[in-house]
Image (tube, rainbow, N blue to C red):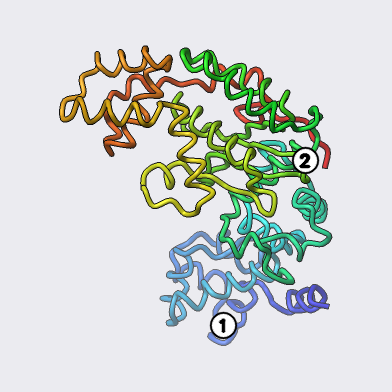
Amino acid sequence: MGNNMAAKNAEWIQHPGAYIKAEMEERGWIQRDLAFILGAPETAVNMILSGKRGITADMAKALGDAFDVSAEFFANLQQTYDMARARSPYSGIQERRRMQTAFPVREMIKRKWIEQADTAMLETQLMRFFGAESVEDIPYMPHAAKRSHYEDREIPPAQLAWLFRVRQIAGSVSVPKYSAKRLRSALREFEPLLLEPEGVRDVPRILMECGIRFVIVEKLPGADIDGVCFWLDDSSPVIGLTTRRDTIDNFWFLVRHEVEHVLRGHGKEREILDDLAGEKASPNVPSEEERVANVAAGDFCAPSEKLDRFIVRKKPFFYERDVLAFAGINLRHPGLVVGQMQFKLDNYRYLTRHLVKVRQFVLPGAIADGWGQTVPVSL
C-alpha cells in the first residue's frame, strides 16, 4: 500500500520546468525572454522547461533573481521532483542495519563465519550461528523478545560472536574422553616445553589427548578477550584462546590459567571469559575462580615463592644477568620470569625484549581460525 501511495504522489509531482512555464505565462514571457533575463543560452532554458535537465544550485539562484523569489524555492522544487522519481531501495536495509548494529556482521562475513546473502538468509544464518530459534531470540538484536543471560552479564556483542565461533568449532572436533588424571600429568609434560618458544607447538596436541577441545580463534575488532573456558557437556571441556597478546609469558599464563579452570570444573554453568589486561594488571580479582586460576598460572610461569625471595634479595636493583640466571636455574624461558616480575613490580616496560612471540609456533599444530584461514564448519 505504501509503495502504491508513493507511486501516485510521484505522478502528480511535476518537473520544475512546468512551474517555471506557469510563472512565465503569468508574466507574459516567452522562452526567449527568460533566456535574455538569465543571460543563458536559449537551448539551456529549453532543456529545463521541457523537463530534460534539472535545476542546478547556480540556476536556482539565477531563477530566484529572475522571478524575485528565494533560490531555495526552485532548489526545493527540484529536490521534491528528484525524491518523487527516486527508486525505492531494495527491501531489507533496515534489517541489515539492525544486524550490523548488533554484531560485526560484515567482519563475520569477511572471516567466512557466515556467507554473503540476501537479508532473509543472513538472518537465518545468524539464527543458526547463535543457536536461536528465531531472530528475536538472538542476543542483542533489536526487538528481542527478552534479554539473554549474556546481556545480563554485559558480554559485548563482538566477544559473544567470538565465543559462539569457538563453541561452533569445538562442537565439530572429536577428542578422546576427558581425563582429569591425564590433564594433571600433562602439566608435567609442559615443564620441559617452557625453556624455548618453540615448545608451545606441542600444547594443542597434549591438551587434545587429555580430552580438551583446544581452539584458537582470532579476536574480532572490539573484542578485548584473551581466552575462555566452558563445557559442551559435563565431560567435554573447551579451552579457547585469541593469542591477541602474542608473547611467551601471556601464552603460557593463559594456558595454565584455563587448565586450572578445567581441573576445578569451572565454566560448567556458564562460560568463563578471560581478559588478562583486567586480571593481571590489578590484584583485585573479580572472583575466587579467577583468583585460584591466576595463582596457579603465575606459579607455573615462575615458581612464586622462589621469585618472591629473589625479588626481596635483589631489590631495588634487578640486573638482567640475575634474571637470566634465575630463569636458567628454574628451567624457564627468561620471558616467563620477566612477565611475572613485570606484574609483581608493576613495571610493564622491564626487559620487554625477552617477551618473544610464539603464535607462529602454535598455530600450525592447532585448530586455528583467523589470520587468513577459516575452519570449515557447517551452520
Indicate which disc residue 23 carries: 1
Q: Image point 43% across, 14% down: which residue?
A: 331
State the residue at coordinates (65%, 69%): 83
- Using a 10 Å C-alpha cutoff, classify the residue at mark 2 as few (fewer than 14 neighbours), some (14 to 19) or many (20 or more): some
Judge depth for marks 2 and 1 and give the one in front: 2
Q: Is residue 152 left or right of residue 38?
A: right
Residue at 72 percent across and 42 percent down: it is 167
Considering the numbered disc 2 on the image, is that residue within a helix, a strand or a loop? loop
Picture quarter with the C terminus: top right
Q: Is residue 176 above or below residue 28?
A: above
Instruction: Give the mark nearer the N terminus: 2 vs 1.
Output: 1
* Quadrant assignment, res 175: top right
In this rendering, would 182 be left or right of 337? right
Residue 235's mark?
Answer: 2
| Front in this rendered view, residue 10 or 124 | 124
What percent of the width, then of the height, locates residue 41? 51, 59
Identified by mark 1, the residue type is Glu
Crowd rating for badge 1 (residues with CA inside 10 Å; few <14, some 14–19, many 20+): few
Label 2 vs label 1: CA separation? 84 Å
